[in-house]
Amino acid sequence: MAESYKERVYEILEATDPEDRVAEAANLIMLLLVVSNVAAVVLETVEGIYLVYKDLFHYFATFSIVIFTIEYILRVWSCDVEPKYRQPILGRLRFALTPLALIDLMVILPAYVILAFPSDHQLLRSLRLLWTFRLLKLRRYSESLETIENVIRAQQRELFMSFSAILFFMVLSSTAVYFLEHDAQPQRFPDIPATMWWAVLTMTTVGDNFYPITPWGKLVGGLIIILGVATFALPTSILTSGFVEELERKREQEKAQERERLEEGP
């Protein structure tokens, strides 16, 4: 009986069956809860809103942590339904170290650390950064974010090459501008690492309030702008192509599933 309950919990949490209405409803509720938490974290930074609804934010955060904790415990408890996590201890440990499980843990961890050390205000401030993991938790319930992850995974080799090209060009251009502009503007181009920041702003056409003033510096700066736009366009084109391929693959998969249902009949 316990095993059947465990399998049912696993099916609901992992939404293994797209026709399972209970799993669909549960995941929708969790998605709304995560979105509400992200909105709450954003609104808490507005002092006027936070001071008025401070207690409400506190109660909602406590309620959310309880729900997320129960969800995490149930996921760890039911994960051995999956064959690769079959071992009672090592299997669950392996599951707990998966990216999504780590995100789930990082969502609830700050609350319990704060409970253990309530008077450590410096620790409280440092743990605020971990609250951003609530946004990453959307990946578990959002098909759109799953699509983005699939695209990045499929195009990782091309993306690595394009970012390597960007890094190479950034180092090359910042080094050239440093040697051309350092004597003329020692405070604005004091060293190569500082010049790299200028190169990033220039390559992305964001710009800054300083620029090369020597003739050769202006020439190189102009080339950086032109080539930088083209270089930064590489990841965009790779991701666009990847999205088209991923969406086409999903359409083909949906069509195949529909054909299978029609062949099976009522």
Image (cartoon, rainbow, N blue to C red):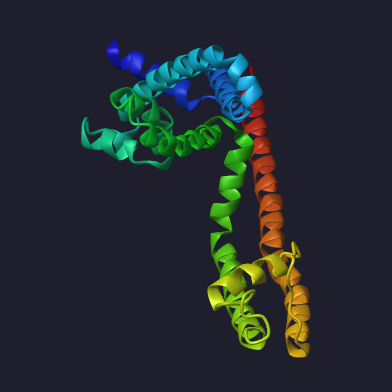
Residue sitting at 39 percent across and 30 percent down?
A: 110
Number of callouts in the render?
Answer: 0
In the rendered image, the quadrant that contains the N terminus is top left
Position in image of residue 186 (x %, y %) = 62, 80
- In the displayed structure, 32 sits above or below 220; it is above
Q: Quadrant of residue 99?
A: top left
- In the displayed structure, 76 sits above or below 127; it is above
Q: Residue furthest front?
A: 187
Position in image of residue 228 (x %, y %) = 72, 72
In the rendered structure, the answer to whether residue 89 lies left or right of residue 256 reads left
- In the displayed structure, 245 sits above or below 7; it is below
- In the displayed structure, 149 sits above or below 56; it is below
In the rendered structure, the answer to whether residue 8 lies left or right of residue 173 reads left
Residue placed most toward the observer, 136 or 202: 202
In the rendered image, the quadrant that contains the C terminus is top right
Residue placed most toward the observer, 184 or 196: 184
Position in image of residue 237 (x %, y %) = 72, 61
Residue sitting at 62 percent across and 71 percent down?
A: 166
Position in image of residue 105 (x %, y %) = 38, 32
Residue sitting at 57 percent across and 47 percent down?
A: 150
Q: Quadrant of residue 209?
A: bottom right
Residue sitting at 71 percent across and 69 percent down?
A: 203
Q: From this viewpoint, is residue 242 visible?
A: yes
In the rendered structure, the answer to whether residue 209 lies left or right of residue 93 reads right
Q: From this viewpoint, is residue 22 visible?
A: no
